[in-house]
Amino acid sequence: MQPVLFDALAACGASAILISQASSEHSICFAVEPGVSEAARRAVDAEFQAEIEAGSVRPIRVERDQSILAVVGDGMRDRPGIAGRLFGILGRRGVNVRAVAQGSSERNISMVVARADEGRAVRWIHREFFHHAASGRLAVYVLGVGGVGSALLRQLDAERDALARQGIDLQLRGLASSRFMHLRPRRGGRLDAGAASHPEGWRSTLERGGEPADLDRLLEHLGETAAGGGRTVLVDVTANGSMAAVYHRALAAGAAVASANKLPFAGPIEDFRAFRPASAQNVFHEATVGAGLPVLHTADMLLGAGDRIDSISGVFSGTLAYLTGKLGAGSVWSEAVREAHGLGYTEPDPRDDLGGLDVARKLLILARICGCGLDLEDIEVEPMLDRPDLADLPLEAWWKRLVEADVSMAGRFADAASSGLELAYLAELDTTGDSATARVGLRAVPSDHPVAGMPASDNMFVFSSQRYQERPLVVQGPGAGADLTAGGVFADILRAWAQRGSAR
């Protein structure tokens, strides 16, 4: 059949530049230049017209917009596994190989892929076989330049030289706020020390010289960087609830994700399950729960060692711990809230903290790590400030009317003290029943309770498990402030770097 086929191609002036035949010899694929594809189809169908009418041969099927990639090298003959690596990297990145041909010299493997996949296929093959020159690069893309984002950028800049001494070439390749972004050229992309240390940080730099924010362009830039070798990390320090889709795209491009944004992990449970545990070596979100404390790491360690977590409780908000500490010491409610806001402990709108949803999301993330299929509406939430009449006010009006709660808040704390109790904003998860239960709210606790007497602004996470029953495992430390959260994100970036080999 082959001689007749090639005679037909030669008669119409077409040359087969790639030939692939199944071992069963029941089919044959060949590639020709796009300009002669139609002539080749007519010539071959005409040559085999009788066989086509008899049903022993099917008509030619033409697939357009394809590209041929060739991997060539003397070393391929003596190194087993080259083909496996080649097809493995393309398969992991979603590039479908339509046909394969290998020369008898074993120095060449050619393959056909869709033209739309050509660029990224070449980039991933280059990364797989020629990544050594960029192997020390840690490329970072930061989304968010608020308090935490600015603190993170300062920390990255301060530690760049120390990381370089460890062989890590830290590069800030992209930065975006909700309105502006800045993308570095592929070469020479370094942290700008002046911008990082400026009193207003990168926010003012972006507003003065940035281009309009375009996540599609940023992710395309990120994908090109990831394909060039080293480790690329997308950092999310926003409060954007629509970031799950962005994470999926970054992961598909070969980047890791380090996040302080609770919303993607406390949103639809399908998103959470997609990020854990299949992407455990590419998704890092320790800072979503404990800021800089190793809370998720502790839960993962217990569960990974075969322990069963029966309950998790404690004070999960450094902001609310600060407020309960101040009120317990006799401070006026509205003044304590203003002080916490001035110290940077609260969100820009303190109602985001006082409503309890932030704590509920942290508890939900822990519950899901424990295997509980809970959603946010399954958590009983009691706001610290239960004043629905103030909830929808403009922020400026809310600040003015905050004093209306001074007397009632002082009375709650005084009543607890008169009974020998303390008030703490507790999060509580119980997994021992038929179904898990979770709640957050202001609770009166006795003096021997683990959270009693906690330092103001500390967080505490109390794990009771099969192995830690009589004496629960406690993780405690400062839990409020942009620098602490940024430090937790920085640690996740370095974890992503450390696990780069196993995540390839």
Image: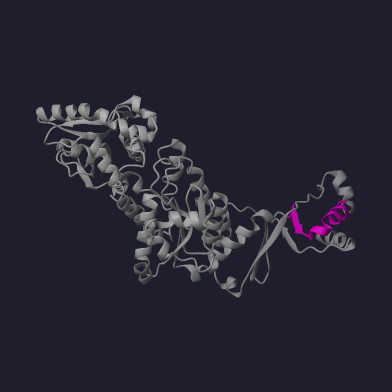
Taking the spot 38% from the left edge, 54% from the top edge, the residue there is 150
Q: Horizontal and vertical percent for residue 250?
A: 51, 51
Q: Which quadrant, please, contains the N terminus?
A: bottom right
Judge by depth and name the residue closer to the eye, 396 or 477.
396
Q: Which residues are magenta?
A: 25-45
Its colouring scheme is one colour
Q: Give left or right: position of 420 versus 131.
A: left
Judge by depth and name the residue closer to the eye, 305 or 486.
486
**Total tally of numbered discs in the picture:** 0
Can you see residue 302? Answer: no
Q: Could you say which quadrant of the image residue 91 lies in?
A: bottom right
Magenta span contains residue 37: yes
Taking the spot 79% from the left edge, 61% from the top edge, the residue there is 33
Judge by depth and name the residue closer to the eye, 79 or 87.
87
Magenta span contains residue 410: no
Q: Horizontal and vertical percent for residue 320?
A: 26, 38
Q: Horizontal and vertical percent for residue 81?
A: 54, 64
Taking the spot 66% from the left edge, 72% from the top edge, the residue there is 105
In this rendering, the answer to whether 405 lies above or below 239 is above
| Residue lying furthest bottom | 74
In this rendering, the answer to whether 482 lies above or below 375 is below
Taking the spot 61% from the left edge, 62% from the top edge, the residue there is 122
Q: Could you say which quadrant of the image residue 459 lies in?
A: top left
Q: Horizontal and vertical percent for residue 319?
A: 27, 41
Q: Give left or right: position of 119 versus 404.
A: right
| Residue lying furthest top | 389
Q: Give left or right: position of 252 versus 54.
A: left
Can you see residue 226? Answer: yes
Judge by depth and name the residue closer to the eye, 29 or 51.
29
